[in-house]
Image (tube, grey):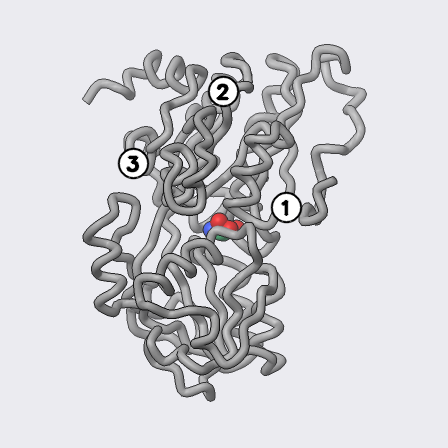
């Protein structure tokens, strides 16, 4: 049972018009995140390009809305998903057996390519008197659902600051897609989301009521960025969302597309090829994907070994020579 999966498109009935027969169909389920994040539409964009070529390769790709990065990594390890989108910090920790994966390294994790940047994004009610991350002390904060990347990364930030959950007035664990409404219903003062921009969830939180995007740039965060290869400084552009006209400084990770060693080479090759051969179309399918560059997708934010199917495609295209 996968209780946190909200939508399962992979279970759609087998198309009758396809040239590949049901017996020849290879199913690929991609684990994403909440429907108002970027993973879900990005996964949908990948599947759309893959499914366009179904009559040639026989792959039927479907996206699943999930609880996020940590959920996806665990489901991939349990072979409940064939592919997933995960934060680069958690790709690193899962493969290397560090942080939350200390007792349980995921050695079969394989990288395919990296995707968009994901700034650690804090949105607060305009009336909550919060102008920096430190002001969250004593406030009602949604720290994210267990299984989400933002919850796991939030815990890292809290530890670096010497905070525990008791430092907040009230702690909630709502799913990413539920946070904006809770904020605007005045049930929480602030929400946290590691997400690409623009995203539906942050648009909702900044248009449905008066809110501000809060900088996350204290000394503890500077230490995290300095000490760890998967964190970097990040900026949320001013003017992108209502209520925040100036650039907001925070830190961030990347989103990455991953699979596992149990998935066969040909399948991963075909999925990689479908996206990379049609990268212009892919970039147009969501504004957060607009800036993707082929060479960077193959190189940046990859800490697990490349899957041999992805490697074959990159070698053919000469993308692995520096
Ligand atoms: N970074 C979030 C997570 O790992 C998901 C963001 C999204 O859905 O776009 O849970």
When asked about the image quadrant of residue 262, the answer is: top right
Q: Secondary structure at mark 3?
A: loop
Is the residue indicated by label 2 positioned so its CB lies within 8 Å of ligand 1?
no
Q: Secondary structure at mark 1?
A: loop
Measured in 3D between alpha carbons, the distance from the residue under mark 3 to the one under mark 2, in whole angstroms, is 20 Å
Image quadrant where one finds the C terminus: top left
Q: In the figure, 82 relative to 134: above or below?
A: above
Question: Does label 2 or label 1 sit earlier along the sequence?
Answer: 1
For residue 65, the mark is 1
Q: Residues within 10 Å of mark 3 (few under 14, many from 20)?
A: some
Instruction: Give the number of the disc on residue 300.
Output: 3
CA gap between label 1 and label 3 equals: 25 Å
Asked if residue 48 can be seen in this view, the reply is: no
Report if the beta carbon of the residue with label 1 is closer than 8 angstroms to ligand 1. Answer: no
Front tag of 2 and 1: 2
Q: Are marks 3 and 2 in contact (CB under 8 Å)?
A: no
Q: Eyeballing the image, is 152 above or below 9?
A: below
How many other residues sit within 10 Å of disc 1, few (<14), some (14-19) or many (≥20)? many
> Helix, strand, or loop for circle 2?
loop
| Visible residue check, residue 237 | yes
Residue bearing mark 2: 261
**Which quadrant holds the N terminus?**
top right
Q: Residue at x 46, y 77 (%)?
A: 168
The residue under the point 35% across, 44% down is 291
């Amino acid at each position: 049972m996968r209780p946190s999966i909200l939508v399962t498109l992979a279970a759609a009935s087998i198309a009758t018009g396809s040239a590949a027969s049901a017996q020849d169909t290879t199913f690929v389920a991609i684990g994403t995140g909440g429907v108002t994040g970027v993973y879900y539409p990005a996964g949908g964009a990948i599947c759309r390009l893959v499914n366009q070529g179904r009559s040639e390769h026989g792959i039927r790709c479907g996206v699943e809305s999930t609880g996020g990065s940590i959920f996806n990594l665990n489901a991939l390890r349990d072979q409940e998903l064939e592919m997933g989108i995960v934060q680069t910090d958690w790709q690193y920790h899962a493969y290397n057996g560090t942080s939350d994966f200390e007792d349980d390294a995921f050695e079969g994790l394989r990288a395919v390519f990296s995707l968009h940047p994901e700034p650690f994004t804090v949105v607060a009610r305009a009336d909550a008197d919060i102008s920096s991350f430190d002001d969250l002390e004593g406030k009602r904060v949604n720290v994210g659902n267990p299984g989400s990347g933002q919850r796991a990364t939030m815990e890292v930030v809290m530890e670096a600051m010497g905070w525990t959950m008791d430092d907040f007035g009230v702690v909630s664990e709502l799913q990413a897609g539920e946070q904006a409404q809770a904020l605007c219903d005045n049930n929480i003062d602030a929400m946290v989301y590691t997400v690409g921009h623009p995203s539906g969830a942050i648009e909702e939180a900044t248009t449905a009521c008066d809110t501000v995007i809060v900088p996350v740039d204290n000394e503890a965060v500077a230490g995290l960025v300095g000490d760890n290869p998967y964190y970097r400084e990040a900026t949320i552009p001013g003017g992108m969302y209502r209520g925040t006209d100036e650039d907001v400084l925070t830190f961030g990770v990347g989103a990455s597309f991953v699979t596992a060693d149990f998935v066969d080479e040909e399948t991963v090759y075909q999925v990689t090829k479908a996206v990379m051969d049609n990268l212009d179309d892919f970039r147009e399918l969501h504004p957060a994907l607009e800036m993707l560059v082929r060479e960077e997708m193959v190189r940046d934010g990859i800490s697990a070994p490349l899957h041999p199917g992805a490697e074959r495609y990159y070698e053919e295209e000469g993308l692995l020579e520096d």
